[in-house]
Image (tube, helix red, strand yellow):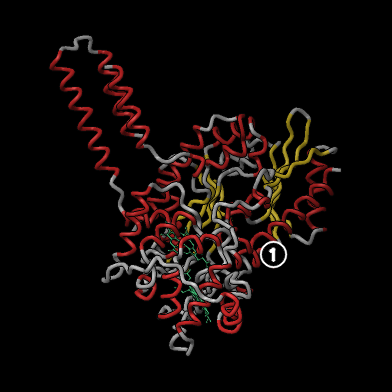
């Protein structure tokens, strides 16, 4: 932004200067050149800053884990190549909280990968790009006896993700989803094989050679894990995410005051506690001067709230629950957020059911109060 | 000369931030500060950016009683009256989302901040609103989060 503003500044001063002789324009050219090269130097991305801005909230400021899994363990860095890291950042893990960072440039992604790599004193491992040709059928049997307890019967991952904040930090890391299209697109067969051979020290993932499986067994497991992909890619968007209304809205057949009273009744009858009724402008302007035709009702149900925060601490943004009532030109409207729209933003499959329930509660309250 | 400027401007726009279509939908940051200090840094920065903190809502009442691992969870509402008025006037759908809010919660010894990318409001408001206002909000918000992130 600033850089462009500078260019338009020059442009302006240039328009003002009617004398454009050769020397002046040379100077100008040089100034623009300096500016552009300055811009390029400024644009050289810094991995530490990018990590702090985009990753640290979940993975911890030193990569030790949080909502996301730890990234700084030597056992992790020794078992993933840079291509895996790059692709994981780009594709994310659809439905498993880890976002797809399409907004970052290639140079920015590379800077982050270099920064992460800097936590290890060893160079990045290099894996064979030869596909592993094991017996997926036998792999399936092995998977259900050796892996399903942690990674889920169909590789869907443990309940929750990473080391979420509502759990104690010393509890084990939750096993990632292996049937995830983002994981499968990022991981090579060689990388999966290496993880099975060596495990990841300091995590529940242990070496399966040490646990008595043979190299052939591991090949079979890799082929089975690979078969989860089943044609899915990280770019397939679930049907539910397209064209969802952003709000739930109803026009009330009652006056503003009656509608508010109806809402209070409807909220209680849905087993929620009314916390507070106030103007939308409350706190933004002196009391008494707020627009009295824009009213918010806040309400809550503690066990519901607790369940939601356990699934994903970020949903607190939409808590406590609220409905907004407005009157414009005699028309009384009741509006809430649409939890179905928000469920997509969190990229967390486990929230979907909760958001559906919340959607139904909001719809019922609106219907009760306005009809 | 003109083409030169066009060229420079084009180069500039190519160097600009990536397109909105792929904007980060949820913006988060972490502070190494403990909850009370991070909260202070947040509110200071919000005010320094010219916004009013209109309410700080506790949502943790009863959480620890239910075995939750943190009791420090707040939602901070903030905005500018004139902007909010203009928006809710022209785009009534936005009344469900405004004023904008930031959640702030303790994670161990540190603190995590989460908010919606204001660009989403543009998606919700549709054609009724010039999206430039949300671009400003996003840049202010990122600047506020940076302040909290580097505060010591």
Residue indicated by mark 1 = A304
Residue B38 image point, x, y percent: 42, 59
- Can residue A55 be seen here? yes
Residue sticking out furthest to the top: A18
Height in image: A50 above or below A184?
A: above
Residue sticking out furthest to the left: A23
The N terminus of chain A lies in quadrant:
top left
In the image, A332: left or right of A206? Answer: right
Foreground of the two, A70 or A272: A70
The C terminus of chain A lies in quadrant:
top right
Foreground of the two, A60 or B90: A60
Foreground of the two, A181 or A262: A181
- Can residue B58 be seen here? no
| Disc 1 secondary structure class | helix
Which quadrant of the figure has residue B125?
top right
In the image, B103: left or right of A124? Answer: right
Residue at left offset 49%, top offset 55%: A91
Residue sticking out furthest to the bottom: A212
Residue A147 image point, x, y percent: 56, 80
Height in image: A37 above or below B55?
A: above
Residue A301 image point, x, y percent: 71, 62
Height in image: A338 above or below A158?
A: above
- All told, the count of numbered labels is 1
Residue at left offset 62%, top offset 39%: B124
Residue B87 image point, x, y percent: 59, 33
Height in image: A126 above or below A293?
A: below
């Amino acid at each position: 932004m600033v850089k462009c503003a500078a260019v338009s500044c020059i442009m302006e001063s240039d328009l003002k200067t009617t004398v454009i002789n050769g020397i002046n324009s040379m100077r100008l050219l040089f100034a623009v050149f300096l500016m552009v090269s300055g811009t390029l130097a400024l644009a050289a991305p810094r991995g530490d800053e990018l990590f702090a801005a985009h990753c640290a909230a979940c993975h911890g400021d030193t990569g030790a884990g949080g909502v996301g899994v730890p990234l700084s363990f030597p056992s992790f860095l020794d078992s993933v190549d840079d291509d895996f890291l790059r692709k994981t950042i780009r594709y994310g893990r659809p439905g498993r909280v880890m976002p797809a960072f399409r907004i970052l440039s290639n140079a920015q992604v590379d800077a982050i990968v270099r920064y992460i790599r800097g936590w290890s004193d060893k160079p990045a491992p290099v894996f064979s790009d030869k596909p592993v040709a094991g017996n997926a059928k036998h792999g399936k049997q092995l998977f259900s006896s050796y892996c399903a307890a942690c990674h889920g019967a169909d590789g869907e991952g443990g309940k929750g993700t990473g080391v979420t904040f509502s759990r104690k930090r010393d509890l084990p890391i939750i096993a990632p989803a292996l049937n995830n299209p983002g994981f499968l697109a990022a991981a090579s067969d060689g990388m999966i094989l290496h993880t099975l051979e060596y495990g990841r020290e300091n995590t529940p993932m242990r070496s399966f050679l040490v646990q008595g499986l043979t190299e052939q067994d591991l090949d079979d497991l890799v082929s089975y894990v690979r078969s989860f992909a089943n044609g899915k890619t990280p770019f397939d968007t679930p049907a539910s995410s397209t064209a969802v209304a952003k709000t739930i809205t109803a026009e009330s057949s009652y006056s503003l005051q009656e509608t508010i009273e109806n809402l209070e009744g409807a909220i209680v009858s849905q087993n929620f506690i009314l916390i507070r009724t106030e103007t939308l402008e409350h706190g933004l302007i002196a009391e008494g001067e707020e627009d009295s035709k824009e009213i918010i009702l806040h309400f809550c149900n503690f066990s519901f709230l607790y369940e939601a925060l356990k699934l994903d601490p970020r949903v607190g943004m939409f808590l406590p629950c609220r409905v907004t009532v407005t009157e414009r030109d005699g028309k009384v409207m009741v509006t809430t957020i649409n939890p179905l729209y928000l469920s997509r933003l969190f990229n967390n499959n486990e929230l979907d059911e909760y958001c559906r329930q919340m959607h139904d509660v909001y719809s019922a309250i609106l219907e009760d109060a306005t009809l | 000369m003109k083409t030169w400027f066009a060229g420079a401007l084009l180069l500039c726009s190519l160097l600009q931030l990536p397109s909105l279509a792929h904007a980060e939908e949820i913006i988060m940051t972490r502070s190494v500060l403990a909850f009370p200090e991070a909260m202070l840094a947040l509110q200071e920065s919000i005010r320094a950016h010219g916004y009013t903190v209109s309410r700080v809502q506790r949502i943790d009442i009863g959480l620890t009683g239910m075995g939750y691992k943190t009791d420090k969870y707040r939602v901070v509402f903030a905005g500018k009256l004139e902007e909010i008025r203009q928006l809710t006037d022209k785009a009534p759908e936005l009344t469900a989302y405004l004023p904008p809010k930031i959640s702030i919660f303790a994670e161990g010894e540190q603190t995590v901040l989460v908010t919606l990318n204001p660009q989403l409001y543009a998606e919700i408001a549709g054609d009724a609103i010039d999206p430039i206002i949300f671009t400003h909000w996003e840049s202010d918000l990122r600047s506020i989060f940076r302040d909290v992130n580097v505060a010591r």
